[in-house]
Amino acid sequence: MNDKIKKICLAYSGGLDTSVILVWLKETYKCPVVAYAADLGQGEEVDDIRQKAMATGAEEIIIEDLREEFVSNYVWPSLRANAVYESGYLLGTSLARPLIAMRQVEIAGKFGCDAVSHGATGKGNDQVRFEMAYIALEPGLKIIAPWKIWDFKGREDLMEYARSRKIPVPVTKAKPYSSDRNLLHISFEGGILEDTWKEPDKDMFVLSVAPEDAPDKPTYVEIEFKEGNPVAVDGEKMNPDALLERMNDLGGRNGIGRLDIVENRYVGMKSRGVYETPGGTILRVAHQAMESITMDREVMHIRDGLAPRYSELIYNGYWFSPERKMMQALIDESQRNVSGLVRMKLYKGNCITAGRKSEFSLYDPDYATFEGEDVYNQKDAEGFIRLNALRLKIAGLLARKRG
């Protein structure tokens, strides 16, 4: 197999897995490896990643700041759809993978790589997300997924290999779980979390305080939307990545955005995931509040009917599929008038809509009022009810006739 691969582009994080993979790829395929790292807000030190990659023998290390692109082109489209997988997960990791894969494919082309590689295992969803994107974007690239073909079984095997090859790995206390972070969220899974009866340790969380430890006084924040996208916080216009960071800070301080669920992975097994998505949680509630006064009823119901399918496509790795793009076009059309201001009340893990207003508001108090008014003839409702109940009346008469 060695003569079939000339150069490999590896999705690289600088952790134990990808450090070992980089060396293993060079040894196994006898070819150069280009390491690619994307900064999506994971808080990793860029200089450390560069130093680790070069020390491990990478021919090139490419590091890109994709935070604004991630939020603008992946998080915001998902927000416009109110996307959520299985009633809770806001798709933080699912949205990051297609962007990383897309840029990895582009870097591979730039450096003449004929293969791409990733560090996802054969049990999880990330392998599907990476590889579906590779195939969709550049079908001719060979895909190398080491966890599916090498003999290593777990972390101890990797550590032994790293020591034998003098691979520099982080000298930190091993976490009893795995985590993944970007601007939208941080996820925790595996290890101690595999016991579904065990509550997560309080000191595990990174982005948020526990709701019981949040301030006793509520925080109010005003979020401005334009065509479904958040554009300003408390009157300050902000870039998408900066805005999401601001909301993460506000939500985290008020204990908002924690989630503990057992979800269904695409590969067939159930998996427990614990998530922190403070900013995304606030923005989703605020976005729904903005839609409640600006979106037509039937348009909303059609969009809401598509949301579970749309979310499932993203979770399962179909970001670049024609059906996801088709749904996105319809969803974005529904957002034309979703513009205005929403006031949110943040208090001890609760995210409460405190007010909403818009020049595109379809809410008219003259029609909605329970007080006396002249714009709505309540007697008209008699015929409306009779016509809509006609099929129920016929079914009822038939049932009575049959006894």
Image (tube, helix red, strand yellow):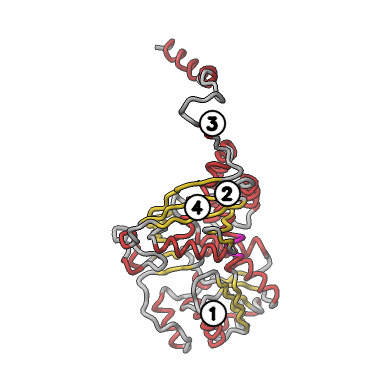
Q: Mark 3 vs mark 2: which is more N-terminal?
A: 2
Query: The residue tagged with tag 1: helix, strand or loop?
Result: helix
**Residue 222: x percent and y percent?**
50, 55
Residue type at numbered disc 3: Asp
Q: Residue at x 41, y 55 (%)?
A: 346
Q: Is residue 102 above or below residue 311?
A: below
Label disc, if present, on residue 340 of the rendered structure: 2
Q: Which residues are magenta?
A: 69-73
Structural distance between the alpha carbons of marks 1 and 4: 31 Å
**Which of pointers 4 and 3 lies earlier in the amino acid sequence?**
4
Where is mark 1, residue-wise?
46
Number of the label disc, if any, that sits on residue 284: 4
Q: Give residue 303's quadrant in the image.
A: top right
Between 192 and 203, the one lying in front of the other is: 203
Q: CA distance from mark 3 to mark 2?
A: 21 Å
Give the distance between the C-alpha atoms of the residues marked 4 and 3, in whole angstroms. 29 Å
Q: Give the SS element for disc 4.
A: helix
Whether 35 is among the magenta residues is no
* Label of residue 288 in the image: none
Residue marked by disc 3: 366
